[in-house]
Image (cartoon, rainbow, N blue to C red):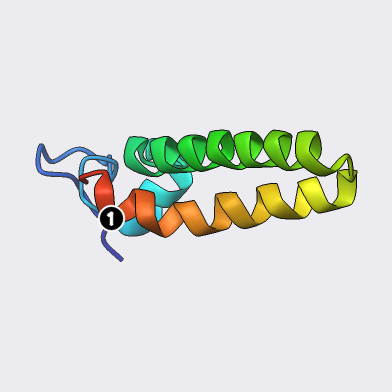
Amino acid sequence: MSTPTGPDSTGSRESQSDPQTRLTSGSDPLLTSHAALILLAAVVIGAVVAVLAYLSSGNTAAAVLAGLAGAGASTPVLHTHIGS
């Protein structure tokens, strides 16, 4: 049985592009900066919609639902308009 070696003939497999090693090493970010920007902007838009809905009606449940709908509806629009 042979031991796999890296390009420098050492026993290290970390230098190879092994998908399993990349997943377990934790070097990749959980979210890309593009996704984080889109989600942050959607949360801000949803919060603005929720505050405006609460100020107009005084109903907390309706304001929460309006905020969630605003955030959900703005996410695909923001993804289209913000370049990747």
Q: Is residue 21 left or right of residue 39?
A: left
Q: Is residue 22 left or right of residue 67?
A: left
Name the residue located 40 percent from the left edge and 35 percent from the top edge.
Answer: 37
Viewer-nearest residue: 39 or 22: 39
Q: Residue beneath label 1, please?
A: 80
- The image position of residue 24, as x and y in percent, is 47, 47
Packing grade of label 1 (10 A; few <14, some 14-19, many >=20) is few
Three-letter residue code for mark 1: Thr
Q: Is residue 75 above or below residue 37?
A: below
Quadrant where the N terminus lies? bottom left
Place residue 8 in its image quadrant. Answer: top left
Viewer-nearest residue: 52 or 83: 52
Viewer-nearest residue: 8 or 75: 75
- The image position of residue 27, as x and y in percent, is 38, 35
Q: Is residue 51 above or below residue 20?
A: above
Place residue 15 in its image quadrant. Answer: top left
Place residue 82 in its image quadrant. Answer: top left
Name the residue located 13 percent from the left edge and 41 percent from the top edge.
Answer: 9
Name the residue located 89 percent from the left edge and 45 percent from the top edge.
Answer: 59
Q: Secondary structure at mark 1?
A: helix
- The image position of residue 32, as x and y in percent, is 36, 41
